[in-house]
Amino acid sequence: MSAGLIILVVLLIACAGFFVGRSRAIATAGGDIRNLHSRPNYYGLTVALFSAAPALMIAVLWLLLQPLYIEGQVSEMIAPADIPEGGSLSLVMTDVRRIADGLDVAVDAGTLTEDRIEDMRADLSDLRTRLGEVGIAVASEVRQNVFMAAKTYRELAAKLRLAMAVIVIGASLAGAAFSLLRINPDYRARNVSEHAIKALLILSSSVAILTTVGIIFSLLFETLHFFRLYPAKDFFFSSIWNPQFQGGSDLGILPLLWGTLYVSFVALIFAVPIGLLAAVYLSEYASKHVRSFAKPAIEILAGIPTIVYGLFALITVGPLLRDYFAEPLGLGNSSSSVLTAGVVLGIMLIPFVSSLSDDVINAVPQAMRDGSYGLGATKSETIKQVILPAALPGIVGAVLLAASRAIGETMIVVMGAGAAAKLSLNPFEAMTTITVKIVSQLTGDTEFASPETLVAFALGLSLFVVTLGLNVLALYIVRKYREQYE
């Protein structure tokens, strides 16, 4: 039984428990709900919570720990001789999982026999040999131990899935029975339900923190692994990016970091003034009719897929900048450039700046405007001297959101700026960013334990640190100016 089906059964038990618990509460009160401590729905809710919450917690923990347990058991079956030269145990375990998936398909089709296993093993060995002849690297030679480990992996996974179904559904039924037996007219069902819901809200509010911690640790562990294989000094201070999956790579982050900041800077230079001016116009000058049309029209830009922006950069903006600016000025002859990606990315960021700034400006108290007008200030003076300074913390937040969006963009950069890692001030030259290289380094059939693959995690952690620095700077600016108006 799959995990999704198990969870569905638990939810059905919880739904049934709600109605059964509600009916039982009314029955214990002799049909008069005035004799109950709480309303009938609270009794049903307690049964549903006891049915679902413990069972779902067990299911989540099981799904997290089961892969670790299975791999720990199966990896002991892999002998050192089964690990290819220059390979790793993790790469062999990848083969084990893939073969186990193939065995699952064969079992579902009802065709798995010992002869079939041997045929699959021979076919895979022949495929690896042919790939090696044309120069495509493969993880390892197929060995008998690998197939036996895959078979054990499949069997152990099937047994644990069955055990999970029995334990989770049993816990759900036990929770329902326990809560039903506690129902009586004096049972404080409302208090129990509210405490449970409060705990659920606390858990939900902790998801963002736990997710951030999980992201940091997942990046940190792989980054430390990378720095054990590649010198940290060369990564942070080298100006050459030249990955070679056959060895001898130069993995300096400086050209990628420069391209990321350069493209983001050009995008913000384009988006922030236009977005802020649009927000000021919509909030202070536009009529209701114009605002009702213009604001949704601007926000449509945020809903356009980034691949469409990439095509727009590749087909329209890039050739236009090349033909009318780059070539006449002698600054380049390529349609892929920092300026191309920056302009198109800036167009995409306009609604982020405009909509958030508009909301912040509208939130400035009307009394501040009236006081400025009462002192004889004009509308433009009120906007410059009162409204914008008061709304500055929110505007900084809008710009920060736009900057974070620009730094994390991939598709527009790939199609607009190219993939050349270089250090240059010429905005008409092709460059690339950290996000593009993260994708390229993790794409393809390459050994996961190699520096050329693990560098993606080091790049991701570096990008995280850059974004964190922007958040700290924005927080400092917000606090500095907010004190003037509190």
Image: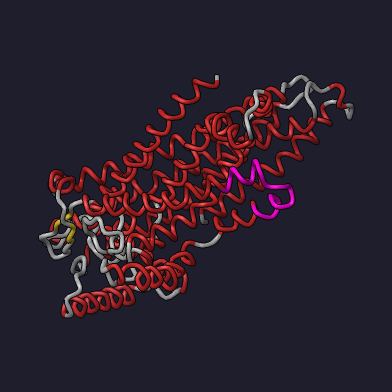
Q: Which residue is at a point 14% across and 63% down the rendered structure image?
A: 84
Residue 464: where, in percent of width, then height?
Answer: 34, 43
Q: Quadrant of residue 244?
A: bottom left
Residue 473: where, in percent of width, then height?
Answer: 38, 33
Residue situated in front as seen by the camera: 144 or 470: 470
Compared to residue 46, the image places residue 435 above or below, namely below
Does residue 173 appear in the picture of this structure?
A: yes
Does residue 152 appear in the picture of this structure?
A: no
For this orientation, the residue located farthest to the front is 376
Q: Give, as a single range, the part of the protein colored magenta.
A: 278-294
Residue situated in front as seen by the camera: 476 or 452: 476
Residue 22: where, in percent of width, then height?
Answer: 78, 35
Compared to residue 247, the image places residue 183 above or below, namely above
Compared to residue 315, the image places residue 146 above or below, namely above
| Picture quarter with the C terminus | top right
Q: Is residue 390 left or right of residue 429?
A: right
